[in-house]
Amino acid sequence: QVQLVESGGGLVQAGGSLRLSCAASGSGFSINAMGWYRQTPGKQRELVAAICSSGSTNYADSVKGRFTISRDNAKNTVYLQMNSLKPEDTAVYYCNVDVVAGSVGMRYWGKGTLVTVSS
């Protein structure tokens, strides 16, 4: 079983910055991809950014140049540095990790952290 603990959400003015963190804990698994998704009421959850075990990254077009995803493999932690925030970035942000335990691949989700950007 993998537990994910997210932190770093909050209220910020437009143009400001926030840094989200997500730490994975547990045993008997290895982590492949890690990522951040976001969701607003009435909309589907959408990918914000993802990072593979190799370090390659993928971003939604709406956040390219403003957000940076990174990971610390020693700490099983993924980060999302969010700069130049816009009101449309307001959402609940969810961390997810793809792990392998034995020969079984699984995906886990965090509980979400709210990011509110005021205009």
Image: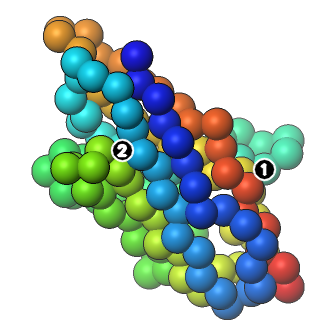
In the rendered image, residue 68, in percent from the top left (x then y), is placed at 40, 71
First-in-chain label (1 vs 2): 2
In the rendered image, residue 45, in percent from the top left (x then y), is placed at 65, 41
In the image, is residue 104 above or below residue 92? above
In the image, is residue 96 above or below residue 86? above
Badge 2 crowding class, 10 Å Cα cut-off, few under 14, some 14 to 19, many 20 or more, is many
| Residue under the image location 29 percent in, 57 percent down | 71
The amino acid beneath tag 2 is Met
Query: In this rendering, which labeled residue sits more in front, label 1 or label 2?
Result: 2
In the rendered image, residue 82, in percent from the top left (x then y), is placed at 53, 74
Residue topped by disc 1 = 40
In the image, is residue 6 above or below residue 103? below
Image quadrant holding the C terminus, namely bottom right
Residue 89 is labelled as: none
**Residue 95 left/right relative to 91:** left
Image quadrant holding the N terminus, namely top left
**Residue 43 left/right relative to 100:** right
| Residue under the image location 74 percent in, 79 percent down | 12
**Residue 57 left/right relative to 44:** left
**Residue 28 left/right relative to 88:** left
Quick check: can you spot residue 61? no
In the rendered image, residue 111, in percent from the top left (x then y), is placed at 64, 36
Residue topped by disc 2 = 34
Quick check: can you spot residue 22? yes
3D distance between C-alphas at marks 1 and 2: 21 Å
Disc 1 element:
loop
Disc 2 element:
strand
| Residue under the image location 48 percent in, 57 percent down | 21
